[in-house]
Image (cartoon, rainbow, N blue to C red):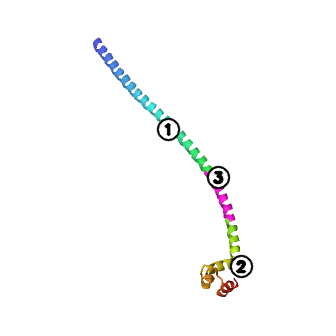
Amino acid sequence: MSNLLLILFTSSEIVLLAVVIIFFLRLKKSETLLSGLQTRQEEFIKRLQFNTQLENELVSTFEQRQQELVALNNEIEKRAAELKKLVNLANEYSKSPQFMREIILNGHRAGKSAAQLAKSTGLGLEEIELIIDQA
């Protein structure tokens, strides 16, 4: 009977030892998995920091570009106002009688007919002929 009891205790100790070994192996596997998750988490945090830095750089460059565009827009508006003044001045000059006379006389010297000059200047044929005759 004592042999049977000894065999029973030994076999229960072996079963308990097997359970402890299985528990240890599962614990080791969980530890490895946890370590891998921590490594991935650190990589993820590094990527987030890098993305944040890139986003900040993009925002600052975008703000800088907007300021440059505003400055360019102001410059273009100034130039547009200057050009408008020049166009108005040119229109006034082109409507002056002396300028029209020069255009007509130069056209006549170039061999254009009075009808062609009247059409291009918007003046009447009689006015063109009168200017040519006065020259």
Provide the residue designation for mark 3.
Answer: 67
Task: Tell which tag, 2 or 3, sits nearer the viewer.
Answer: 2
Provide the residue designation for mark 1.
Answer: 44
Residue 68 lies within the magenta run:
yes
Work out whether residue 118 or residue 89 is closer to the camera in this orientation and state it: 118
Mark 1 closeness class: few <14, some 14–19, many ≥20 residues within 10 Å: few
Provide the residue designation for mark 2.
Answer: 97
CB under 8 Å between discs 3 and 1 = no
Three-letter amino acid code of the residue under disc 3 = Gln
Q: Is residue 86 left or right of residue 11?
A: right
Which structural element holds mark 2?
Answer: helix
Q: Earlier in the sequence, mark 1 or mark 2?
A: 1
**Residue pushed farthest bottom?**
126
Three-letter amino acid code of the residue under disc 2 = Pro
Task: Work out how far the residue at label 1 is from the one at label 2, CA to CA, in angstroms.
Answer: 80 Å
**Looking at the image, which residue is at 64% across and 58% down?**
73
Position in image of residue 131 (x %, y %) = 68, 84
